[in-house]
Image (tube, helix red, strand yellow):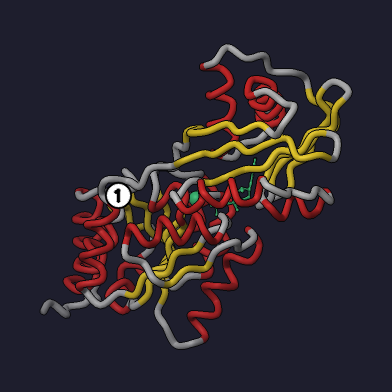
Amino acid sequence: ATPMSIMVGVGKGATAGVLIKDAASLERFEKVDTLVVDKTGTLTEGRPRVTAVVPAPGIDEATLLSLAASLERSSEHPLAAAIVAAAKERGLPVHEVADFRSMTGKGVLGGVGSQLVSLGNAAMMRDQGIALGDLEGRADEFRRDGATALYAAIDGHPGGIIAVADPIKVSTPQALESLRADGVRIVMLTGDNRTTAEAVARRLGIDEIEAEVLPDQKHQVVRKLKSEGRVVAMAGDGVNDAPALAEADVGVAMGTGTEVAIQSAGVTLVKGDLAGIARARILSRETMGNIR
Ligand code: ADP
Ligand code: MG
């Protein structure tokens, strides 16, 4: 491509809300045959809300949510924001936390008053040696609905479940459809639970899923697909997506996402609308003189 055609392509992209940082991304986009896409904040809005609070026997809903919010106040995870907001809406107290710890891709823990409280996924509970019992089946019901179910533990015993749901962006189904029609294979990549991931994927017609992937493993999924000869675009919004965005042939960050993700990607979709990916492919073809 000539410098002039690249300038034209970058300009057209900018007008359409597709910011192209480097010429290489624009040149490569037409060759992309696989889109690896993060779930939370990329396929979904990334503004989760608490949809259910299920305390274990002997604990009440308000206490469970109040303890959870106390911990999550110190976390920057989107799930944390949902839990803090839910406690605030219900006028519940939020307490000081001693020895707060955040386990990446798993959850949070700390001391609230005299109690040791933890909140997170099954791996988090396993690490804490918590026997979940009946709670597991209950959590799976929420997950089959596409929600993220978090377990709480209080002083070594199950404390209950908090279900959090994150709606699919209205623009997502159409955007994936046009990419598929253009021959792009879609792979969902998420740190979230497999059952939740499958429920969301089913609604979007996605049949390739990499779930329960720890943040530091996300880029390896991209690397593996590349080693199989695929040309991979990765779309994501989070700090934990940054290495995968950098590893991909073309990294696509959501403009609504974190600064780290935007810096690691060659392309940014200003409004986080995935339709920009199909548009970028067309621009790439035009730029490379391969208009069909
Ligand atoms: P994603 O790839 O969906 O952005 P993450 O890797 O950030 O997911 O997190 C994976 C899982 O770890 C979450 O679905 C959740 O179960 C758990 N988790 C991570 N951070 C927290 C937190 N602050 N509070 C509770 N659970 C958390
Ligand atoms: Mg995300």
Q: Amino acid at mark 1?
A: Asp
> Which residue is identified by label 1?
273
Question: Is 51 displayed left or right of 111 in the figure?
Answer: left
Residue at (19, 61) in percent of width and height: 8
Residue at (29, 61) in percent of width and height: 277
Question: Which of the pair 243/288 is nearer the observer?
Answer: 243
Considering only vertical position in the picture, is 181 above or below 275?
below
Where is residue 164? Give x, y as percent: 51, 39
Residue at (47, 49) in percent of width and height: 40
Q: Quadrant of residue 95?
A: top right
Considering only vertical position in the picture, is 169 above or below 75?
below
Quick one: label 1, few (<14), some, or many (20+) residues within 10 Å?
A: many
Considering only vertical position in the picture, is 247 above or below 77?
below
Identify the residue at the far left of this view: 292
Q: Is residue 100 visible?
A: no
Question: Which of the pair 77/230 is nearer the observer?
Answer: 77
Callout 1 secondary element: loop
Residue at (68, 30) in percent of width and height: 68
